[in-house]
Amino acid sequence: MTTKLYCGKCGSFMVGESGTSHTMKVHRYYRWVNTKKKKLCDKKAVKKDWIEDLVVNYIMKAIMNDEVMERLLDTLMELQKKERTDLPFLKKQLEVSILQEEMHKPMLTREQIAFFIYRFRKFDVTKREQRQRLIDSFVNAVYFYEDKITLNFNYKDGSKAITLAEVEGSDLSVLGAGKRLRGIP
């Protein structure tokens, strides 16, 4: 999530780091770039597994919601139509040029797009590569504030603010996530 996680206070992005405790346990976390080099922000580091679990959890909730998936499919179908701006001009050209353009960028059917998107519902989120594909496919940015986290998804109107109270009331609170929202204890 290094390229997707930002500080809500200073706007800097986060980079992954790790450290070893006196018990030789490795701790992985994300640290704000501005705290690391320039000391421009006082935000604490965030545990890597916790923030990734939170993001993946909300992605899976969206994927399992049929209404959200239908809106996503509608948006993708509209985007696909808008991207074909050269086609009207080419229709005035030779028929060969039209065929070349259509072969270069074929239109996908709603069923083909749905097949691709609904496959994410079967992902095993305990597998690192499948978690990464979920995040890469659905998350544009994550903004981390003192009292909330804002997830910006890769679809129109795809923003979700999660408050500290919601995290403390979620399944993630069992993992102690509420305490870790503000950093590493």
Image (cartoon, rainbow, N blue to C red):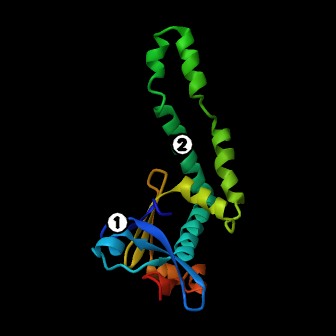
Residue at the spot x=65%, y=64% of the render?
128
Q: Quadrant of residue 43?
A: bottom left
Identify residue for label 1: 12
For label 2, the SS is helix
Q: Residue furthest bottom?
A: 22
- Disc 2 to disc 1, how far (Cα)? 30 Å
Identify residue for label 2: 76
Q: Assess disc 1: are there few (<14), some (14-19) or many (≥20) residues with their C-alpha within 10 Å of its C-alpha.
A: some
Q: Where is residue 135 shown, x and y percent of the image?
A: 56, 59
Residue at the spot x=49%, y=52% of the render?
154
Image vertical order of residue 14 relative to residue 39, above or below: above
Q: Assess disc 2: are there few (<14), some (14-19) or many (≥20) residues with their C-alpha within 10 Å of its C-alpha.
A: some
For label 1, the SS is loop
Image vertical order of residue 87 relative to residue 60, above or below: above
Q: Where is residue 109 shown, x and y percent of the image?
A: 64, 35
- Is 125 situated left or right of 47 in this image? right
Q: Nearer the viewer, residue 29 or 51?
A: 29
Three-letter amino acid code of the residue under disc 2: Leu
